[in-house]
Image: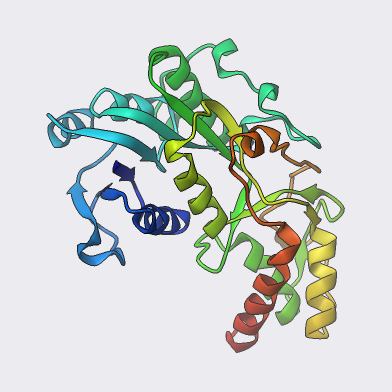
């Protein structure tokens, strides 16, 4: 099939493109052209500013794609600039678990974009979570006939995670840097960047539509992460009120129900099967890194 990936040059977008290529699809990536990609001659490239509606219409005039993956839909106007310009059979939008009020075993019905008023906004107008809600609202309200799926990811982690949120906890523990953690007992869902990319790719030929949760099986708490790193590194995490504010602060215990994804034939690895290997890799990195 003919695929378009809006983004695809870093993090789980790279894994998505690689998975699509492995599956034999014809892949085009559309970016601003500022970040190098590792795909060589295996992909076609379109250079475009995706927030510019006129530029998008010019770039995708008279082009059809079987599936469009939108890794960069952060607000309602992002969805509009994409779907007003691109003709496609199926639209796969990367959304987020941040659309929910977090709690254990969240099902997709916990947030219904069709029941929320549509707010046209740009990325800088709203918070991240409200931006993602507006993006979903734009899709269901303004493009109801479009075959589409909205993938709600929790925190995405991996060796290629440029946010370094999980690495924060490892580095601070290994280096003995004080940190302020307000939710050590909160149990949270995660997905690996490789799992995220492969999950998205697997949706190309699936019948599932609407919102779908995607995460690795199981949860883990910040306390468990800190205890594991401290034990392996022979260090004691310095949890202090005056320490650097930890990136997962404010997140309550939550987990995503993935029954809908499993019924559609989409699944991810168990979190425990690879998380601790990632923490080991982070520890090695932190030990080599200067303060």
Residue drawn at x 63%, y 51% is 268
User: Horizontal placement of 81 versus 162: left or right?
Assistant: left
User: Horizontal placement of 22 versus 132: left or right?
Assistant: left
Q: Can residue 238 be seen in this view?
A: no
Point out residue 283 in the picture as x, y percentages from the top left corner.
67, 80
Residue drawn at x 79%, y 35% is 103
Q: Is residue 97 visible?
A: yes
* Quarter of the image that includes the C terminus: bottom right
Residue drawn at x 70%, y 58% is 246
The residue lying toward the viewer, choosing from 186 and 206, is 206
Q: In this view, does 104 lie above or below 28?
A: above
User: Horizontal placement of 99 versus 46: left or right?
Assistant: right
- Residue 106: which quarter of the image? top right
Residue drawn at x 42%, y 56% is 19
Q: How is the image coloured?
A: rainbow
The residue lying toward the viewer, choosing from 1 and 186, is 1
How many discs mark residues in the rendered view? 0
Q: In this view, does 84 lie above or below 195?
A: above
The residue lying toward the viewer, choosing from 175 and 109, is 109
* Quarter of the image that includes the N terminus: top left
Q: Is residue 25 above or below residue 151?
A: below
Point out residue 133 in the picture as x, y percentages from the top left corner.
54, 26
Point out residue 203 in the picture as x, y percentages from the top left corner.
48, 39
Point out residue 205 in the picture as x, y percentages from the top left corner.
43, 37
């Amino acid at each position: 099939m003919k695929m378009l990936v809006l983004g695809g040059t870093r993090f789980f977008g790279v894994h998505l493109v690689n998975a699509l290529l492995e599956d034999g699809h014809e892949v085009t990536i559309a970016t601003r052209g500022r970040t190098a990609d590792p795909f060589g001659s295996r992909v076609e490239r379109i250079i475009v500013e995706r927030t510019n509606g006129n530029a998008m219409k010019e770039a995708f005039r008279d082009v059809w794609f079987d599936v469009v993956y939108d890794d960069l839909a952060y607000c309602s106007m992002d969805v509009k600039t994409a779907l007003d310009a691109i003709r496609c059979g199926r639209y796969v939008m990367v959304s987020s678990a941040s659309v929910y009020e977090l709690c254990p075993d969240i099902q997709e019905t916990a947030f219904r974009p069709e029941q929320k008023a549509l707010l046209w906004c740009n990325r800088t107008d709203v918070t991240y979570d409200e931006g993602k809600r507006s993006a979903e609202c734009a899709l269901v309200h303004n493009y109801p006939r479009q075959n589409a799926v909205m993938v709600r990811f929790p925190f995405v982690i991996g060796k290629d995670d440029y946010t370094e949120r999980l690495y924060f906890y490892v580095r601070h523990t290994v280096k003995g840097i004080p940190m302020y953690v307000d939710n050590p007992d909160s149990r949270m869902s995660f997905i690996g960047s490789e799992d995220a990319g492969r999950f998205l790719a697997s949706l190309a030929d699936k019948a599932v539509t609407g919102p779908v949760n995607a995460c690795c099986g199981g949860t883990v708490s910040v306390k468990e992460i800190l205890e594991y790193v401290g034990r392996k590194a022979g260090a004691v995490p310095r949890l202090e009120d005056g320490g650097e504010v930890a990136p997962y602060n404010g997140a309550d215990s939550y987990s995503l129900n993935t029954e809908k994804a499993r019924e559609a034939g989409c699944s991810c690895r168990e979190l425990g099967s690879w998380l601790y290997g990632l923490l080991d890799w982070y520890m090695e990195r932190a030990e080599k890194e200067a303060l």
